Image (cartoon, coloured by chain):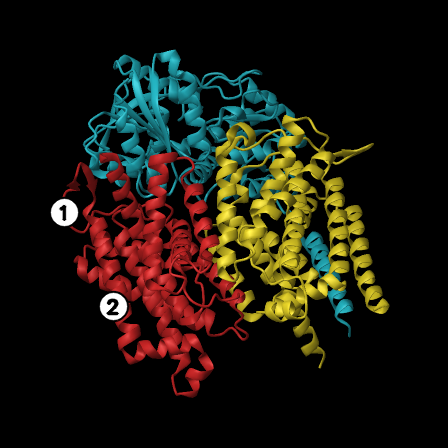
Chain colours: A yellow, B red, C cyan
Amino acid sequence: MRLRWGKNNIAFMVLFLVVVAIGIWIENQYYLQVMTFIGINTLLALGLNMLMGYAGQISLGHAAFYGLGAYTSAILSVHYNVCPWLALLGAVLTVSLIAFVIGMPTLKLSGYYLGMGTLGFGMVVHVLFREWSTLTGGASGFVGIPPLELGPISFLSIRNYFYLVWFILLASMVICRRLIDSRIGRALRSIHDSEHAARAVGVDTENLKLMIFVFSAAMSAVAGFLYAHFVSFISPGSFGFLASIRMVTMVVIGGMASIWGALLGASLLTLLPEWLHAFADYEMVVYGAVLMLVMILLPQGLTRGLMDIYERSRK
Amino acid sequence: MQEFLQYLFSGITNGAIYAVIAVGFSMLYSSTELINFAHGEFVMLGALTLVTLWSGLHLPLVLAFIVTVGIVSFVGFVFERVAVRTVKKPDHIVLVIITVGASIFLRGIGMLLWGKDAYSLPGFSDHQPLDIGGATLLPQSIWIMAIVGAMVLGLYYFFNRTLTGKAMRACAISKRAAWITGIPAGKMVLLAFMMSTGMGGVAGVMIAPITMSSYDMGTILGLKGFCAAMLGGIGSLWGAVIGGFLLGISEAMGVGLISSSLKDAIAFVLLLAVLYVRPGGIVNAGDVQRF
Amino acid sequence: MSTQKLTKNVVLLLCVIFTICLLVSSWAQAASAYKIGGIFAVTGPASFLGDPEKKSMEMAVKAINDRGGIDGHLLETVIYDTEADPTKGVMAVNKLINKDKVLAIIGPSTTPTTLAVINFVERARIPLISCAAGIQITQPVKEWVFKTAQSDVLAVASLYSHLKAAGIQKIGILTVSNAFGESGKHQLEAQACNFGIEIAQAESFGAKDTDMTPQLTKIRKVSPQAVVCWGTNPGPAVVAKNVKQLKMKMPLFMSHGVASPKFIDLAGDAADGICLPSGKILVAGLLPADDLQKEVLIQYIDQFESQYGGKVSGFGGYAFDAVNILAEALKGSGGNRALIRTAIEKIQNHIGVSGIFNFSAAEHNGLGPDAFVVVKIKNNTWELLR
């Protein structure tokens, strides 16, 4: 047990060093910004991966929590002049509460019906963002979200924000790793394999599913907070059905039940459109084709797929 | 009263559109337990191909109809061979993501072939809008309802009375057992895909005169059709029809009686309510599949 | 080998790839070319804006280069597609600023995307000439942000003064549920009392909806003298068809969002008799000979239609005007962003496709009410009313 924890620790340390190195070495603001977005997307994929990969529950409306986190923080810091860090706390608490309330009846569904239920929830929230314009700014969006600062450090520069996002992400990855390796994590995986069997050995499936649902929603809320204060502008269009599908795609392509899968999936889906700019009108076709190819050739996701290739090439 | 009737007719019009798309969804699910998120794009292909054949090349309507459905089924054939058959470990969620990728791909193809503009088509029959009790109903809506009825009856007959249909149902229940009894499971899946996408094509042809057809029409329609199919109970054909009409009518009633800006929210709240009460959809379609 | 170590190697590999991308990326350019960037919603829900805008920009730049460029420097364009997604817009803007190192940026096409990129543009101190309509883009004035599209404030004012002249006092409105429709609704409601107009019923519809008869039925119930529909294709075409289907007799008015021949194509017979505010481009041929914009308009129409085919609408004109305004500002600036910015503010009486521009330190849109005329659709073509 201790040896495994040690190996995980090494991997995280390496990532930490890589992040610091990139922050110091890379000058170009554009690359830093892209990587900041990768970080935010990884946070989203990580939370959803915990739900889908480990607990085996599908959610097609998770962008709603992303948006709720962003809007709650925006509303608190602009309309109520709350310090943004407190707004983060407010966002996480609000979203967790909403996830708890929604999760209770919705998680009783299973399979595609759960997907449908979460999808419905996502659509309702999207309409709410669009129509409650006095609070959210409506379809035209919410402007003027304040930048972040912590004492003397201002997160206005892209480099500092890059550090912020990636350190929060690293912390989340460590938390997730600890969670997975704990009793709770084992119980979750048992639910994934067979809910009936898990219940038979005394696992409290209902509460566990709810707990992980709330946890993944909270992570999405943090990602929403980070997005809102980075771009200083949010609009309902960024948190709709297509965004939810994108999150699910990130999880599946990266590899489910894998923390690094979240990183790979988010990286691919953030970088691919940037790489495909040169294709102009063919961008959509190539993007769709790449997604299909990756899933056809590496159905276990990028993480396991790349590892398989590596292992096979060594033989 | 006249207003209520108009809301009802509008709901029926949209409901028929959703139903005809939902039937394709459910049909595929009932044969393969797969949700095809690209189904909306096949509807788009059907609509735009009809625009080219009927409006552009001026082929007679019936011929254009048949050729369109043929072309869309062929695309479905290619899709199944290339994207679905070749997957080594067909986990359901993986296939779903493949269909997501396919939907983006097909949308891109649609944009390249037909451009970014919208196209409109005249109705199939030149009749004036029907006046019933002071409310008007487009004759195209009647056409759609007729086709939906024909499709469902045809499928019912196919699944229950023909050997091929029964073989397909057997594959859905257990591929292994079906294969043991000599049913070519692979061919059945292929046939199911072709039929489902063909039905998507039919849906596109029928709705093109009512909607404005464009390369991105498939996203929303596919979503609504999926919701209708789930609402009625995925896998059940009658469920798809009921779900479609229920969704369409609840949307129209939401607009008419409550508020037009909250239309989507109302429809989805209704959907959630139904799912909470009957977790298998309205028709309570049997065993609920874990993804 | 353990899974963890392998995964670590994969991550390291990714970082190596990042680094290689960094080292390999080179920006080979003619040292003397002026690079300008463009971000438009070329694909996606606003492609009816972004596609003609991109084409117009390329056309305008080519025309300038054919005449020898600016001060001997040729113009080079780098254009990215935002798909009307604010996040993509932000990334594209940063790519233009930091990777392509452009002097100025033209676009984006939509208001939400513009609002998203404003902060980055202001911080990077680079001029941005937006093609989006939202009034918040230039009011309050931001130092580096300009726009060429007419505001919907002017469109609503133009329409309302036409309604007032026609004696219409009670209307029903039907707006699309996106940023354009929402902004239009806001203006319609805000300006109604200035023109003695009462909005008896306000409804909305989704951009891709297929049937608006319930909303129209609700509007018909309050017996308005006219119906105003504020949206962009294809929704308003469906509305026009529904109005005909419901046999509603009162006149139907639209917004400048459908000021394009495409609307007539989509709505067919139902478009007959509809009036809307529009830039002068749709009726260029009908303008009096002494109209200052006539020559520019006809030249633009001829160039665009011969180069790209199809019928032109006013949307591409926003980018066309932006490029020409930028070109004027580039003269004598030597490629200095701050000088370009100051030069734009000094531009007066620039005759463009969208109107006649008069910029100043306090006015970063530069258009007045004369940018709009009211046109009527008759026999599948446009008729000038005022």
What amino acid type is highlighted by mark number 1?
Asp
Quadrant into which the N terminus of chain B falls: top left
Quick one: which residue is furthest to the bottom in this view?
B181
Could you tell me how far apart the alpha carbons at marks 2 and 1 are, in whole angstroms? 27 Å
Residue C309 is left or right of residue C341, and the answer is left
Quarter-wise, where is residue C151 in the image? top left
Q: Closer to us: mark 2 or mark 1? A: 2
Dot 2 falls on a residue whose secondary structure is helix
Q: Chain of mark 1?
A: B
* Horizontal and vertical percent position of residue B5: 24, 39
What amino acid type is highlighted by mark number 2?
Gly
Q: Which residue is mark 1?
A: B126
* Horizontal and vertical percent position of residue A118: 52, 52
Residue C87 is left or right of residue C5, and the answer is left
* Horizontal and vertical percent position of residue B67: 24, 64
Q: Sort mark 2 into few (<14), some (14-19) or many (20+) by Cα contacts within 10 Å.
A: few
Q: Residue at x 48, y 31 (%)?
A: C131
